[in-house]
Image (spheres, grey):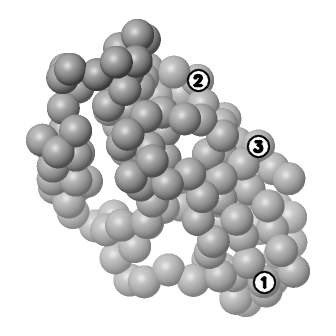
Amino acid sequence: MIKLSLNTSKRVEFVDITSMIQKSLEKEGVKNGGCIVHVPHTTAAVTINENADPDVVRDISHTLEKIVPENWNYHHSEGNSDAHIKSSMLGCSLYLIIENGSLQLGTWQGVYFCEFDGPRSRQVWIQFLQ
């Protein structure tokens, strides 16, 4: 398993980690198979979405904030219930296909680490399956 480290700088932030995953698979010499991408945090997530227009990520972030506002009548005492809920909505793991040494993503797709309780030091775990 590979553990990637990253630092977020905002409370809510979407970080394109596609190139980090691709570099890891090249370093490992994986040609064909699959890749599990997992985020071991309860206030963060991972998702696939458009990486050509930054307005898409901005719209996702704004919509999540409208659906699950930061300040509401939550019971969790740490004050980050919204982050836990957003993490659950998007999920903590993805499965990606690898073919000929490359991630198989659509033309406009990228893999995003989603921070909902930053800034923090975070990890993304990657397991290649051949």
Determine which residue is flagged by label 2.
121
Determine which residue is flagged by label 1.
33
**How far across and how far down the image is residue 37, in percent?**
65, 59
Specify the amino acid type for callout 1.
Answer: Gly
The mark nearer the N terminus, 2 or 1, is 1
Q: Residue at x 60, y 58 (%)?
A: 93
Q: Residue at x 43, y 66 (%)?
A: 48
Specify the amino acid type for callout 3.
Answer: Lys
Residue 36 can be seen in this image: yes
Q: Residue 99 is drawn in which quadrant?
A: bottom right
Q: Is residue 112 left or right of residue 27?
A: left
Circles 2 and 1, Cβ within 8 Å, touching? The answer is: no
The mark nearer the N terminus, 3 or 2, is 3
Q: CA distance from mark 3 to mark 2?
A: 12 Å
In the rendered image, the vertical position of residue 53 relative to residue 65, given as above or below: below
Q: Residues within 10 Å of mark 2 (few under 14, many from 20)?
A: few
Determine which residue is flagged by label 3.
3
Q: CA distance from mark 2 to mark 1?
A: 30 Å
Q: Secondary structure at mark 2?
A: strand
In the foreground, 59 or 41: 41
Q: Residue at x 62, y 75 (%)?
A: 96
Report the number of discs: 3
Q: CA distance from mark 3 to mark 1?
A: 19 Å
Specify the amino acid type for callout 2.
Answer: Ser
Q: Is residue 93 left or right of residue 49?
A: right
Q: Residue 114 is drawn in which quadrant?
A: top left
